[in-house]
Image (cartoon, helix red, strand yellow):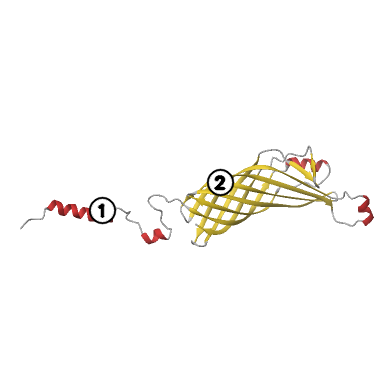
């Protein structure tokens, strides 16, 4: 009777044991499927979602306020409630998206006049996403444009109809805008798969790229104040999509 070589038996045992030791001791396949564990080699993410955000924003209006104050009109802080809507697509961790925002500065009164300022803009953004499926962080750089609107009118009271016809210049709306670039940091917590719900925050800085162009009632205004079109914002956001 031929004896089975001991060396072959040991080799077979090692071969059978290799698949059992190839995974980390704490690897849980079910937990991995639920997204609670990261793969040994980080996986590229794909997906997309839309979102709504709300927060606080401040834009620099120093040059505009100097002109308004020079002629006795109310000035503005450039700060207030900021609302934003947007969406992103994630392709192998590369983020491509866009958003539009509006900023309400409220009303200001001075010397019988009421002045209302508001701002807004739209930006195209690109970046790269880091982190796990459930939690991620990503910086974005964007390019777009912003606009500002100032309405000046008498502060309430009453006026005769004929007086308005003889002096129609009782109110004016001035608008101005320019090109900008933006830098922002975004952090998110994700729940679910389809649909996916997103909760997070965003903070960033907007920087103007040129001078401000002003218009009033379809008339181009020259020698207007240069607003620099810069400021910061912080917003909380909520969204839904697939990922």
Whichever of labels 1 and 2 marks the residue nearer the N terminus, that label is 1
* Side of 18 relative to 47 (left or right): left
Q: Secondary structure at mark 2?
A: strand
Circles 1 and 2 in contact, beta carbons < 8 Å: no
Q: CA distance from mark 1 to mark 2?
A: 44 Å
Q: Residue at x 55, y 55 (%)?
A: 200
Q: Secondary structure at mark 1?
A: helix
Q: Position of residue 3 (x, y in %)?
A: 8, 55
For the N terminus, the quadrant is bottom left
Q: Residue at x 78, y 44 (%)?
A: 215
Q: Position of residue 130 (x, y in %)?
A: 48, 48
Question: Taking the image as drawn, is residue 77 in sight?
Answer: no
* Side of 167 relative to 52 (left or right): right
Q: Position of residue 35 (x, y in %)?
A: 43, 58
* Label 1 Cα neighbours within 10 Å, binned few <14 / some 14-19 / many ≥20: few
Q: Position of residue 190 (x, y in %)?
A: 51, 58
Mark linked to residue 122:
none
Q: Which residue is mark 1?
A: 18
Q: Which residue is mark 2?
A: 126
The residue furthest left is 1
């Amino acid at each position: 009777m031929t004896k089975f070589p001991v060396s072959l038996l040991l080799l077979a045992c090692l071969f059978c044991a290799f698949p059992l030791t190839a995974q980390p001791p704490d690897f849980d396949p079910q937990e991995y499927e639920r997204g609670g564990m990261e793969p040994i080699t980080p996986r590229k993410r794909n997906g997309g979602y839309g979102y709504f955000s709300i927060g606080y924003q401040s834009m620099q209006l120093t040059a505009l306020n100097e002109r308004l104050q020079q002629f006795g009109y109310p000035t503005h802080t450039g700060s207030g409630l900021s609302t934003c809507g947007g969406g992103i697509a994630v392709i192998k961790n590369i983020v491509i998206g866009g958003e539009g925002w509006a900023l309400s500065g409220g009303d200001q009164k001075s010397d019988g006049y009421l002045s209302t300022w508001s701002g807004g803009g739209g930006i195209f953004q690109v970046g790269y996403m880091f982190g796990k499926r459930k939690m991620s962080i990503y910086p974005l750089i964007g390019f777009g444009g912003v606009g500002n609107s100032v309405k000046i009118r008498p502060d309430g009271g009453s006026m005769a109809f004929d007086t308005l016809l003889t002096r129609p210049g009782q109110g004016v709306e001035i608008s101005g805008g320019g090109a900008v670039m933006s830098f922002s940091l975004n952090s998110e917590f994700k729940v679910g798969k389809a649909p996916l719900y997103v909760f997070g925050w965003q903070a960033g800085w907007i920087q103007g790229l040129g001078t401000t162009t002003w218009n009033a009632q379809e008339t181009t205004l020259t020698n207007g104040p240069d607003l620099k079109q810069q400021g910061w914002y912080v917003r909380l956001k909520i969204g839904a999509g697939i990922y």
